[in-house]
Image (cartoon, grey):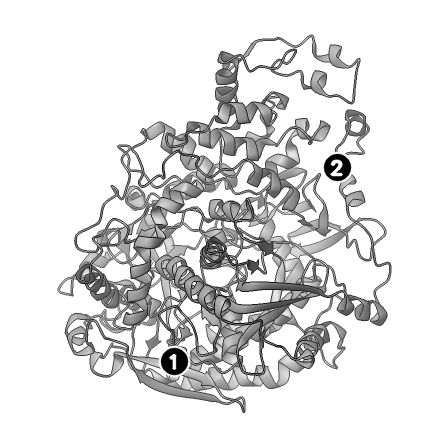
């Protein structure tokens, strides 16, 4: 009795509000035997019983990727974020135009996804599927298939925060990797990856941590980089982590990262 | 949008950065601002307007553009992520591509389909859908768009790229609609895509021809006027009317499946067939917040072995089904399910148990659901998972559909119909429906001039739409509350579709009361024009009301239990009277007309079907048994 969730929700209506603000709502705790309430349940309660807020959802089961937001500072799908009684904050994804409250405009990022041309490029039409070995399918391609386009990886990516003009971002890069690994595809996806900012990634692995489809981002990026390096497509002066060097807007800061070890990491030589 | 590192370090490139990207136009929101909004009309002219951006809509628009005409998709959700298509990541392929192209094969398929649909299939329409498959190449296109199909443990393609001789439709390939959506957005493969824009009504010319639509841009609150030579209605199902459990309807479909297209057509006098029918499946009940996962199970016995499903006392279905016909189609499995519920043999939530060991049999959804729930939610799936039945598609569609899916309204095509869709096969209906509708729409668009539209008509629609925002009724009621009233009236939590005549009459009475009393006092607590979810709910509530009324009137007519239609006063299917379609129509005076229409059965006559469709499982086939709650004990063991 009496347990509640205090939800601090980011509110902003660009047509009316001069600035965004936070508003607190008290939501009664209602969990079943699973022992938690999801973020989406909390938002539903506010919308139905307290006042209208703008948030988006569709499937209630981590499939459609529409309820992506930042809950307690951690980006995730509201429908798959388990909450306990207490204080929680709800914020929209960072770095995207805000439509209203927790809804962001997905079009700018979606454009990057579309530009990767995820459709298979083949000389002759593909008529039927070919056999694929178990691990490549279940642990890689099947997960890539299931990308939610939820934009969570765009929220966390530090490389994008520095420049988003010549890096397509983690999600779209994964689509390039998807086609690179696909036995059908006949286009040069390694080259595409390099020119889409393959070496801008800092291998921090944040995208992998938040990915609801559990795509092995770092492993796939490493595969692409290995391939690129073999073909001599590694831009001069770039190493695993020193994206600072590649940033045209800054000089003199590159030394900061020189101390970092070059050449290899836990995934091997890159 | 480009941010420098300094911005980043100073913390200014964080969330606050986004605000600058958004132009602030209106400082105040007043009556005057409303007039301004209404004036900010955007006009669009195209050959073919496609309403709805799911698989059906995308297929239709791609086909139209492929044939040299212009097509605009208008979608109320986020394009590629809306409705059932948007949530069915990994939808099944169903295609006749690998089957021989002869009428005998198609007739064979239709016979099986009609049995699965318990004898309600619109055969000639389905014939045209299946005919389109060869040309359409669903599987080849799915691969081209970028999907990787479903594989077995040994690395072979699940479908083996070949047909099942018993049922020539190739199944279970795995089709990712998001990649099709990306294809649509590339290279102007579709002329224009306008999403987050709600079509509030269709436009008809003075001669009664489809002439476009009026929509509201939900993001900016401005009107869009579409003029087109042909219109394709691909708005999907009305599953969102089936109950409300706090998180959603008792449906695996999404919040956009409110049947807005069906309701618009009903309001324009188009007769609808089989509105009382849905297709259903069972989905996981706990955890509450995510109960409508796609972690569903197929209860037709083909994917989930019958000895892995149990009632609340852990009696396996295989034991229940001893001595019954071997074909347990979706309709019969739902009758078992609700029969058990009716006789007090289900769990408190009205569910049964399923052994999660069936996961390898249904790898598409289930395998990953278990993994994700463990990793992302910290929820361990028990050995026996409690599942409740839910709807996932509705069967109601226009009674009259030509071979190019044209409805009674000239120039108005319908895509995504699952005629007699009790048994599913909704992708066949969606994709091929889009294909044949596009063929028809292109033909129409090459033949006619742009139909005229009366300016007053457009104005009236816009006024009505903005009326929801402007009015301040006495004793107001919020739109979302009206929606839930409709849902809970049509489909209550305890009995769901189990109804008798008195109950259906009471439902109709209550729905009519909502129409008379609640709709006029429905208002939006939120008065902003920008992404006003309540305003959208006003449109949705009205559309859902029409669908719920249509479905109830249709249900009143069908005095038997068939498919997802369950009558406690007529608990068994009756092939003598039941192999007909219910038709409901809203006439000019706003009254509902109902009739039982003979079934379209050109390929497999109803007399033959009556012998084929099994009727041995009714709602009372499995007698009541005292509840021991053994399931719970076993679950916690």
- Place residue A209 in its image quadrant: top right
Q: Is residue B419 visible?
A: yes
Pair 2/1: label in front: 2
- Place residue B298 in its image quadrant: bottom left
Pointer 1 residue = B555
In the rendered view, tell whether residue B473 sits above or below residue A203. Answer: below
Pointer 2 residue = B1
Front-most of residues B630 and B249:
B249
Q: Which residue: 60% across, 29% down? A: A206
Q: Residues within 10 Å of mark 2 (few under 14, many from 20)?
A: some
In the rendered view, tell whether residue B578 sits above or below residue B317. Answer: below
Quarter of the picture containing the C terminus of chain B is: top left
Percent x, y of residue A196: 59, 28
- Residue B622 is marked as none
Percent x, y of residue B502: 41, 86
Numbered marks: total: 2
């Amino acid at each position: 009795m009496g347990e509640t969730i205090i939800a601090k929700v980011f509110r902003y209506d660009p047509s009316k509000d001069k600035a965004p603000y936070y508003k607190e709502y008290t939501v009664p705790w209602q969990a079943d035997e699973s022992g938690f309430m999801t973020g989406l349940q909390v938002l539903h309660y506010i919308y139905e019983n307290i006042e209208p807020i703008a948030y988006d959802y569709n499937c209630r089961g981590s499939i459609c990727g529409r309820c992506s937001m930042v809950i307690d500072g951690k980006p995730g799908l509201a429908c798959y974020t388990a909450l306990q009684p207490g204080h929680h904050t709800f914020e929209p994804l960072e770095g995207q135009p805000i439509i209203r409250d927790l809804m962001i405009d997905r079009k700018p990022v979606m454009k990057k996804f579309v530009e990767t041309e995820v459709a298979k490029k083949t000389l002759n039409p593909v008529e039927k599927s070919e056999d694929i070995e178990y691990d490549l399918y279940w642990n890689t391609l099947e997960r890539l298939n299931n990308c939610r386009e939820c934009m969570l990886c765009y929220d966390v990516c530090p490389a994008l925060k520095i420049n988003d003009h010549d890096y397509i971002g983690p999600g779209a890069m994964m689509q390039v990797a998807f086609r690179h690994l696909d036995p059908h595809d006949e286009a040069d996806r390694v080259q595409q990856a390099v020119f889409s900012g393959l070496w801008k990634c800092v291998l921090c692995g944040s995208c992998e941590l938040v990915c609801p489809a559990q795509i092995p981002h770092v492993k796939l990026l490493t595969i692409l980089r290995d391939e690129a390096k073999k073909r001599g497509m590694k831009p001069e002066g770039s190493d695993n982590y020193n994206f600072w060097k590649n940033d045209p807007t800054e000089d003199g800061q590159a030394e900061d990262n020189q101390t970092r070890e070059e050449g290899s990491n836990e995934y091997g030589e890159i | 949008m480009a941010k420098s590192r300094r911005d980043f370090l100073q913390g200014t490139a964080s969330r606050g950065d986004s605000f600058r990207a958004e132009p602030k136009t209106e400082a105040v929101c007043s009556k005057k601002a409303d007039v301004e909004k209404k004036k900010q009309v955007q006009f669009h002219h195209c050959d073919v307007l496609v309403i709805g951006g799911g698989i059906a809509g995308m297929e239709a628009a791609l086909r139209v553009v492929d044939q040299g005409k212009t097509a605009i998709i208008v979608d109320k959700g986020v394009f590629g992520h809306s409705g059932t298509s948007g949530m069915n990541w990994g939808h099944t392929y169903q295609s006749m591509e690998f089957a021989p192209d002869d009428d005998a094969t198609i007739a064979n398929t239709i016979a099986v389909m009609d049995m699965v649909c318990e004898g309600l299939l619109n055969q000639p329409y389905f014939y045209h859908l299946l005919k389109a498959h060869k040309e359409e190449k669903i599987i080849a296109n799915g691969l081209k768009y970028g999907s990787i199909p479903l594989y077995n443990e040994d690395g072979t393609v699940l479908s083996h790229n070949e047909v099942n001789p018993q049922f020539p439709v190739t199944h279970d390939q795995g089709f990712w609609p998001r990649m099709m959506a990306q294809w649509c957005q590339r290279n102007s493969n579709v002329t224009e895509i306008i999403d987050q824009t709600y079509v509030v009504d269709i436009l008809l010319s003075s001669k009664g021809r489809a002439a476009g639509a009026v929509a509201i841009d939900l993001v900016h609150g401005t009107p869009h006027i579409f003029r087109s030579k042909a219109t394709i209605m691909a708005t999907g199902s009305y599953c969102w009317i089936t109950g409300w459990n706090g998180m959603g309807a008792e449906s695996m479909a999404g919040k956009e499946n409110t049947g807005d297209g069906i309701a618009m057509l009903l309001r324009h006098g188009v007769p609808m067939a089989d509105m009382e029918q849905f297709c259903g499946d069972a989905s996981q009940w706990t955890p509450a917040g995510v109960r409508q996962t796609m972690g569903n199970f197929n209860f037709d016995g083909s994917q989930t072995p019958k000895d892995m499903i149990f009632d609340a006392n852990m009696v396996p279905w295989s034991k229940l089904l001893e001595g019954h016909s071997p074909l347990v189609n979706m309709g019969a499995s739902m009758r078992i399910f609700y029969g058990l519920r009716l006789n007090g043999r289900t769990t408190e939530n009205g569910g049964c148990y399923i052994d999660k060991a069936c996961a390898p049999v249904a790898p598409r959804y289930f395998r990953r659901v278990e993994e994700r729930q463990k990793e992302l939610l910290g929820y361990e799936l028990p050995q026996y998972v409690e599942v409740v039945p839910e709807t996932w598609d509705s069967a109601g569609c226009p009674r009259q559909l030509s071979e190019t899916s044209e409805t009674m309204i000239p120039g108005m095509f319908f895509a995504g119909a699952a005629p007699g869709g009790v048994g599913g096969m909704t992708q066949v209906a969606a994709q091929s429906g889009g294909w044949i509708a596009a063929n028809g729409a292109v033909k129409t668009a090459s033949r006619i001039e742009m139909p005229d539209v009366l300016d007053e008509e457009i104005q009236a629609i816009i006024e009505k739409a903005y009326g929801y925002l402007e009015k301040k009724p006495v004793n107001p009621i919020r739109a979302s509350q009206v929606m839930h009233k409709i849902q809970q009236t049509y489909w209550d939590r305890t009995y769901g579709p189990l109804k008798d005549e008195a109950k259906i009459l009471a439902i109709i009475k209550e729905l009519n009361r909502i129409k008379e009393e609640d709709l006029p006092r429905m208002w939006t607590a939120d008065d902003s024009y920008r992404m006003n979810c309540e305003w959208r709910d006003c449109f949705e509530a009205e559309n859902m009301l029409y669908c719920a009324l249509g479905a109830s009137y249709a249900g009143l007519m069908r005095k038997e239990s068939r498919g997802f239609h369950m009558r406690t006063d007529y608990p068994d299917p009756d092939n003598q009277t039941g192999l007909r379609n219910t038709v409901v129509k809203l006439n000019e005076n706003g009254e509902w007309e109902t009739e039982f229409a003979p079934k379209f059965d050109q390929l497999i006559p109803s007399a033959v079907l009556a012998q084929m469709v099994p009727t041995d499982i009714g709602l009372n086939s499995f007698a009541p048994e005292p509840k021991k709650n053994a399931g719970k004990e076993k679950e916690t063991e």
